[in-house]
Image (cartoon, rainbow, N blue to C red):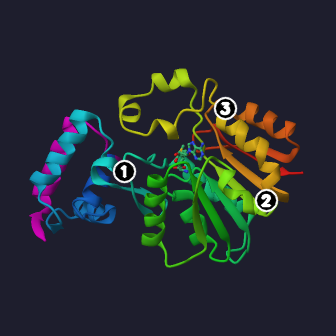
Amino acid sequence: MLCVSGKDFLFWKKKQLSKGGDQQSLAVLLDCVGGITISDLNLISINPKENLHLKNNLEFLESVWDDHLLKSCPIQYLCGTTFWRDLELKVSNKVLIPRSETELIIDIVFNIFRGKSDKFFFAELGTGSGAISIALSLAYPFSEGVATDINHDILEIASKNYINSSKQTNLKFYCGNWWSPLENFKGKLDLAISNPPYIPKDTYEKLPKEVKNFEPKVALVGGEDGLKHIREIIQRAPLFLKEKGWLILENHFDQGEKVKQLLIENKFTSIEIVKDLSGIGRFTIGRYK
Ligand SMILES: C[S@@+](CC[C@H](N)C(=O)[O-])C[C@H]1O[C@@H](n2cnc3c(N)ncnc32)[C@H](O)[C@@H]1O
């Protein structure tokens, strides 16, 4: 462990932020590579006379920060780690960095299944880093979950994240196109969740370079109108859900009404567009009959 005075550290931190970037990204770097948590940061701002202990020296941290600023590469990919709810997850450029707005999906589930000891069977389609499924399997230890993705490398990251976060065995991973790997679970699901690729093709072309140049296209683009995957997921959902089973979908900021219409056409009831913390109709939920 390397020791640095609080005063020197705060001077260093101010210098890094003056070059660009945001506090949140710097906090990720400091935690993952420097071993300095948010509570360490808070303590040192209150009492700069204290010393800080670092996993890597400030020169090394600065070189990663400069790399992040120069290439516009997300800090999470450079550090190989991200934080999501109370999870610390490994990420590589094969998986989407799970977004903070997606964290609300877990709260939506908390409103549906209120008891920690509730037993239910859920599926997540397109699990990426595994964030949603891992959080659910930890929150509901008596549930059983299956998480799918289109690519083996992605599932390897998700299953490693599960092993690192939990000693439980109530989550399994399957590879394949949307519902295809779940043929054995027809009519058995109490809940299905997906945050599928939903960005329209033209919008994708205009995304900021830190997203477009680094995050996997397969995780982002939803065809011409963005609804290609959402349509496929909704149309086949009735085969897999139990009667009164829930479907929770994340969608683009302006897709809520269209997703609602698709759910109505496929005989879903109790349909609701749920807003994220910015007031955007980010999630659409419904029950099968
Ligand atoms: C928007 S990302 C969501 C990842 C993760 N669930 C999250 O919320 O951070 C969409 C995920 O769907 C996966 N995916 C894309 N096309 C797929 C398909 N046809 N079948 C299954 N998964 C697919 C991608 O690989 C990616 O991991």
Report which residue position mark 3 lands on: 227
**Mark 2 surroundings: few (<14), some (14-19) or many (≥20) residues within 10 A:** some
Task: Locate the N terminus and report the quarter of the image it occupies.
Answer: bottom left
Disc 3 and disc 1: Cα gap in Å? Answer: 26 Å
Left or right for 184, reference 217:
right
> Residue drawn at (36%, 50%), measured in percent from left and top?
92
Name the amino acid type tagged 3. Answer: Leu
Report which residue position mark 2 lands on: 186
Disc 2 and disc 3: Cα gap in Å? Answer: 24 Å
Query: Could you tell which of marks 3 and 1 lies nearer the N-terminus?
Result: 1
Tag 2 secondary structure: loop
> Residue drawn at (55%, 64%), measured in percent from left and top?
135
Indicate the position of residue 281 as horizontal and vertical percent values.
67, 38
* Residue 266 vertical placement versus 82 (above, below): above
Tag 3 secondary structure: loop
Report which residue position mark 1 lands on: 92
Q: Which residues are magenta?
A: 1-24
Left or right for 162, reference 123:
left
Query: Could you tell which of marks 1 and 2 lies nearer the N-terminus?
Result: 1
* Residue 24 vertical placement versus 228 (above, below): below
